Amino acid sequence: MTDAPDNVGRSASPAAAGSLLRATLEIDGATLTLLPRRAPVGNSGPIRGRPLTVFPLGVDGSLDGTGGADGDPDGTGGADGNPDGSSGTSGTGDVARLARLRAALPWPDVALLPAVLQPGDAVGVAVFDLSPDEAVAAARALVLPRVLHWDGRRAHLLP
């Protein structure tokens, strides 16, 4: 892989799940963008002093590069962007991928926040309160080369 230091390789393989230069998410009604080794853009109040890890869900919105029929991240069969699977009808492949993500986390009932990864508008999810070691362990379990981890002050790409 020939990535820049702040880039996750972009290919259709599961080992390179999306090109991650920044992640945008909405928390408490405010848009926030995290960039590696920089201060966040937007209202950082909800994440100040609290770890947050962003997991890419693949080039096409999946953990394994296969995606659902419409690339929806939550397994609901719609494009509502709610990765917690709280609405819609079930898409078996996407539900299985999100189950793998939850199983790789230290506590499987954690809330997942939808995120958009740039460049390319790739789908991802953010998880609060993971330590760097927990984030790396989950990424390895999911065969993700890197995740974006906010340590409470700055974002970093973790191998």
Image (tube, rainbow, N blue to C red):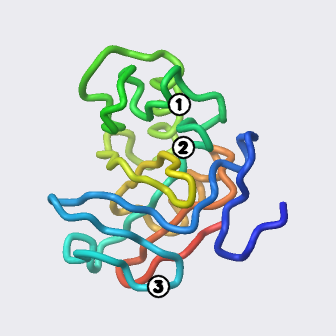
**Residue at left offset 26%, top offset 64%:** 31
Q: 140 and 153: which one is in front? A: 153
In this rendering, position of residue 94 left or right of residue 85: right
Q: CA distance from mark 2 to mark 3?
A: 23 Å
Numbered mark located on residue 97 in the image: 1
**Residue at left offset 53%, top offset 76%:** 156
Numbered mark located on residue 12 in the image: none
Where 71 falls versus 132 (above or below)? above
Residue 21, how many percent across, how many down?
Answer: 57, 68
Crowd around label 1: few <14 · some 14–19 · many ≥20 (10 Å): many
**Amino acid type of disc 2?**
Leu
Q: 78 and 48: which one is in front? A: 78
Q: Quadrant where the C terminus lies?
A: bottom right
Q: 99 and 20: which one is in front? A: 20
Q: Quadrant where the N terminus lies?
A: bottom right
Residue 73, how many percent across, how many down?
Answer: 44, 35
**Amino acid type of disc 1?**
Arg
**Residue at left offset 66%, top offset 35%:** 65
Disc number lying in front (1 or 2)? 2
- For marks 1 and 2, the one nearer the N-term is 2
Q: Which residue is mark 3?
A: 38
Q: CA distance from mark 1 to mark 2?
A: 9 Å
In this rendering, position of residue 115 left or right of residue 148: left
Q: Are marks 1 and 2 in contact (CB under 8 Å)?
A: yes
**Amino acid type of disc 3?**
Arg
Q: CA distance from mark 1 to mark 3?
A: 30 Å
Crowd around label 2: few <14 · some 14–19 · many ≥20 (10 Å): many
Numbered mark located on residue 57 in the image: 2
**Residue at left offset 38%, top offset 45%:** 107
Q: Are marks 1 and 3 in contact (CB under 8 Å)?
A: no
Disc 1 is placed on an element classified as: helix
